[in-house]
Image: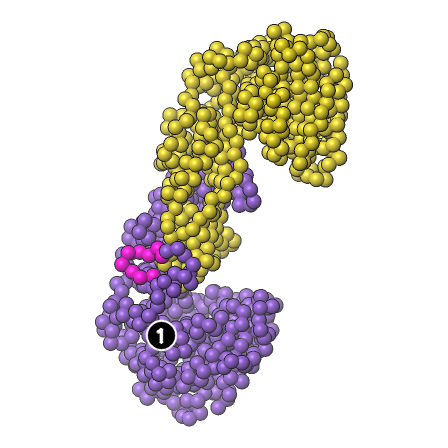
Chain colours: A yellow, B purple
Amino acid sequence: MFDPVEKLKEYIRHPSVSTDSNFKAGMRGAQEFVAGLLASLGFAIEVVPTAKHPIVLARRGGDPKWPQVIIYGHYDVQPADPLNLWKSAPFEPTEREGRLWGRGAADNKGPLMVHIAAVARLLERDPQLPLRITFMIEGEEEMGSPSFPAFLEKYAPELRKADFVFLSDTGSVSEQQITITCGLRGLMLCDVEVTSSRSDLHSGLHGGAIRNPIQAVAELCASLHTPDGRVNIPGFYDDVLDVSDWERAELAKLGQSEEQYREFLGVPAFHVAPGFTPFEATRFQPTLEFNGIGGGYQGEGTKTVIPSKAFVKMSCRLVPNQTPEKIRELVYGAIRARMPKDVTYRIVDQHDGCPYVVVPPGRSNTPADQSPVLAKAFRAVDTAVTEVFGRAPLYLREGGSVPIIGEIKRVLGLDSVLLGLFLPEDNLHAPNESFNLNVMRKGIAASEKILAALARG
Amino acid sequence: MFDPVEKLKEYIRHPSVSTDSNFKAGMRGAQEFVAGLLASLGFAIEVVPTAKHPIVLARRGGDPKWPQVIIYGHYDVQPADPLNLWKSAPFEPTEREGRLWGRGAADNKGPLMVHIAAVARLLERDPQLPLRITFMIEGEEEMGSPSFPAFLEKYAPELRKADFVFLSDTGSVSEQQITITCGLRGLMLCDVEVTSSRSDLHSGLHGGAIRNPIQAVAELCASLHTPDGRVNIPGFYDDVLDVSDWERAELAKLGQSEEQYREFLGVPAFHVAPGFTPFEATRFQPTLEFNGIGGGYQGEGTKTVIPSKAFVKMSCRLVPNQTPEKIRELVYGAIRARMPKDVTYRIVDQHDGCPYVVVPPGRSNTPADQSPVLAKAFRAVDTAVTEVFGRAPLYLREGGSVPIIGEIKRVLGLDSVLLGLFLPEDNLHAPNESFNLNVMRKGIAASEKILAALARG
């Protein structure tokens, strides 16, 4: 068996920044490294070309009756700048304080290495392990996975035969409290651009004759929430999944303090829809946020202009069982109905992503038709995490979005088991990223137990 | 008598751009030119230093029983760029098509030269002309006249002994229809900056817990107008002067087409407070406009952020007898009362200016205590314009602001007679500025008649 920490160092040394064309060699190096590592474990490698960075498909076949797991990961990393804030060079991995420091250590090279190492151990012990395993490792995650949906569609006939997807690209609360992410919010984004007059106007000569486009945008935005903090669009909440008692109870186990959270955010007070704590609202409720607004003169001092145009960029976070398509229709319908006739406007589509939820076995709302292999995987995760980390995992929905998880569900019909292996202090997407080597060791042990339990059938 | 067109050319050749320190020589040249010209006519010159560009005070005294007029003008001009759009060099004045082309030809060197030439003719014919004349020519008008109020305060004991102020720094409808501007709107400007969280937040992790500052700004802005287009602040309209029937009738004489105005603005429809035409609303009604708004991500594509801050820049145009002080208090009061408690905010004072109105003699609302000299001036203007231009002038309030006129009224207690000498096609503040030489000739004749009538007593 290889030394996973040394292999992780080697992996991190390939500076695989997918968004920066200066890092082509690093991208290729990381892709070849991970493909070579899996080939050395006996996997059949297919490098699937995309418009930007290829996807590595590594297959271990076997008896079609064996259970089949797809392990997802990505070999690309965030840019490392600002470089001057790093205590050691981002692409020269360094061990100190029980951590391995380097860009990608936690997102996602370390967690992926956990599962590769677990598979390596299992196969070393039992080369005939009755488990079909497919690694699916992309190189565009930090770009928003633009090539991934088409890849899924193309490989769907094969991939949808798997039982579930296993991955570690989410976080846990702490080393002591491993978290299994059971739900993610979806997204629906758009811009609204309002035009009033043909060109900017003198506010003295013409002020009083027309509706200012900033006013039109403000009136639209103000109409989209009720005073109590809900989204004010008929039908918006129709498909929102009820929160189960077990989910609230699970969340309460976190023991977070609202006052500490308020101080962390630095707001005078929360503004939360009725019936939810801030912790619940960010996970279980959909939102409509304004991500940007602009129009007219934004410089120092004053300019007495009536601008010709103003715009707002908005995004909805969606929860199960909302769909981006229906929410887009409802939001656009509200915009069209509310826009006054004395201005013109344009709605610009932006991207979207499906929300996702999976219910572990034995909960009040576990689907009756849950796949037995998935249920077994959840039970194996629970047992393994409890044994290795000393405490049962928490099963939480999160407020963020990992659009590929919803996409995998939509295209392949597969659920995902999201074992959180990075921690709040790991500095993802920031200088001085690191991966806790204790978590790495324990993660390998847990992953090994989980995969072994699946293989046992 | 000097040749006024040749003198105007000489004046324009001094590139007196007050806002650009590269034009110091041009500023000094224009100031010395105009002071020298008035000295040659027998005026006593005082160059009053200010923080930026001095004010030229040129006095012709005499018997204290003589009427006294202050003639206002400014020797600074707008920047000339973009230079490539000029058909002839902006500071090399050129005659063609009956016009003199050059930066400052219409704003304000030509119109000021009209009055200087009229005074020259009068004094040539009658060196003992029983009229006291003070030219008050500033060099910071295109910067917003920052030094002017302090100058007025300092010279008030002398200046307020004058009977009225005479100037040509407003426009007329056309060469055939000279306009006397009888009112100007005032200004009150401020910014509102709203802060929600300490820093920008991930809209997935935290969306649903707090009020987005863009939402807070939008809700504030949306609250500030009623659906029918009035300003929604209690007391805002309390001091608004009723529109007189003669004013509506005078405005109707313009014969403007609403449809042509709508097409000029390029809006799908007007948005005008009830009871007013667009032409009336822009002159007789106050406004609250949003001049700029900003917050969050304004670039291409998307960024799923909850911004920490958002702001709006707003301005009110005021009409008589509103005051900037009271309107500031009312607007700030509304902002304070309406801002939700879950955000923090800051109101930033910007500048302001008083509205202004003067009523020509003989109208239904002419003040009973109107100064006889002012009334005589208005009658003289009416007669002179009718004789020289062939049609009686129109007496109109305008929607724009010339803060110094309100300031002169406030500090000196003096009304102004604003004889419009530039035309819509003169391209003020734009490339290819010009002054119509026919208007110049007629203007000199009219000004001479007006001043002569005053001197006759």
B269 in magenta: no
- Looking at this view, name the residue that lies furthest to the front: A157
Task: Name the secondary structure under disc 1.
Answer: strand
Q: Quadrant of residue A113?
A: top right
**What chain letter is assigned to the residue under label 1?**
B
Residue B80 shows up from this direction: yes
Magenta stretch: helix, strand or loop mostly:
loop
Residue B443 vs B20, above or below: the answer is below
Say which of A272 and A319 sits in front: A319
* Residue appearing at x 45%, y 36% in the figure: A328
Rendering coords of residue B285 (x, y %): 32, 60
* Residue appearing at x 58%, y 17% in the figure: A164
Q: Which residues are magenta?
A: B270-278
Count the numbered circles shown. Answer: 1
- Check the picture and name the quadrant holding the C terminus of chain A: top right
Q: Could you tell me the amino acid type at mark 1? A: Ile
Residue B167 vs B120, above or below: the answer is above
Mark 1 closeness class: few <14, some 14–19, many ≥20 residues within 10 Å: many
* Residue appearing at x 42%, y 80% in the figure: B134
- Looking at this view, name the residue that lies furthest to the top: A456
Q: Quadrant of residue B189?
A: bottom left
